[in-house]
């Protein structure tokens, strides 16, 4: 059972445009929602994360929007740059037995054309 | 602070062999988790270690095992390798299990022939 659904699978955006990646989750017990950025040959790097008690979090050009009632959250990349071309993963986690174990979305391959 | 380091970065093995991968967490981090990343299944949780004890285990066969040492370094072992074990194996560390934020290493690319 896929607990975190991520879309789209791939995304092509022009330089300067807005990239939007969406995720939906099922388990309302999730309470931590990070986004990771992964370049080829590298491990995922934490980009930005949000807790369900806020509806939006912004860090530079990256913004997470969170809709608790819809059980959805999204990543917005403003003024997208070719250097943003990477695979993006959303995740959802909850504390179980004292540990946070994330469930990941399948990833979105973003290509930003110059 | 140095990040999470993993060795080796690349490995080629043949079916039936076994392999050991190593992970050194960020200094001060005592919780280590392992993940398998494949194009077909995405990122899947293997297991989590803290204080030399396995706290959680994902849905993987018993051929996958791990351990953690007193200095928080961790190893994972895969015995009787199968073609389907070809994947990027990622290690992530956090200060303790109760910290939600995890920091990933670069991974070990395992190819099984």
Image (cartoon, coloured by chain):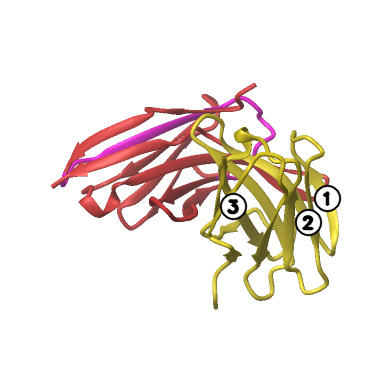
What chain is tagged by disc 2?
Answer: B
Q: Residue A19: x percent and y percent?
A: 28, 39
Q: Residue B108: x percent and y percent?
A: 56, 55
Query: On the same chain: label 2 and label 3?
Result: yes
Q: What element carries label 1?
A: strand
- Calculate the distance from the C-alpha at mark 2 to the C-alpha at mark 3: 14 Å
Q: Earlier in the sequence, mark 3 or mark 1?
A: 1
**Viewer-closest of A66 and A101:** A101
Q: Can residue A65 be seen in this view?
A: yes
Q: What element carries label 2?
A: strand
Please give the letter of the chain rendered in yellow: B
Query: Can you tell which mark lies on residue B55?
Result: 1
Q: Does the magenta stretch include residue A75?
A: no
The colour applied to the residues of chain A in this rendering is red
Highlighted magenta segment, given as a residue range: A15-33
- Calculate the distance from the C-alpha at mark 2 to the C-alpha at mark 1: 6 Å
Q: What element carries label 3?
A: strand
């Amino acid at each position: 059972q896929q607990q975190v659904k991520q879309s789209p699978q791939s995304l092509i955006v022009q330089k300067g445009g807005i990239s939007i990646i969406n995720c939906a989750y099922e388990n309302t017990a999730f309470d931590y929602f990070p986004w990771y950025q992964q370049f080829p040959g590298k491990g995922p790097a934490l980009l930005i994360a949000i807790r369900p008690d806020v509806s939006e979090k912004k860090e530079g050009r990256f913004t997470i929007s969170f809709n608790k009632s819809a059980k959805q959250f999204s990543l917005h990349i403003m003024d997208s740059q070719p250097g943003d071309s990477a695979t993006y993963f959303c995740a959802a986690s909850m504390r179980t037995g004292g540990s946070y174990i994330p469930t990941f979305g399948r990833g979105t391959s973003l290509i930003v054309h110059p | 602070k140095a990040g999470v380091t993993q060795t080796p970065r690349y490995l080629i093995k043949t079916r039936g062999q076994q392999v050991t991968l190593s992970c050194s967490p960020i200094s001060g981090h005592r919780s280590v988790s392992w993940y398998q990343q494949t194009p077909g299944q995405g990122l899947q949780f293997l297991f989590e270690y803290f204080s030399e004890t396995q706290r959680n285990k994902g849905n993987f066969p018993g051929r996958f095992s791990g351990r953690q040492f007193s200095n928080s370094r961790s190893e994972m072992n895969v015995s009787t390798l199968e073609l389907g074990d070809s994947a990027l194996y990622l290690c992530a560390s956090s200060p303790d299990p109760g910290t939600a934020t995890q920091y990933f290493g670069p991974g070990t690319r395992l190819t099984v022939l």
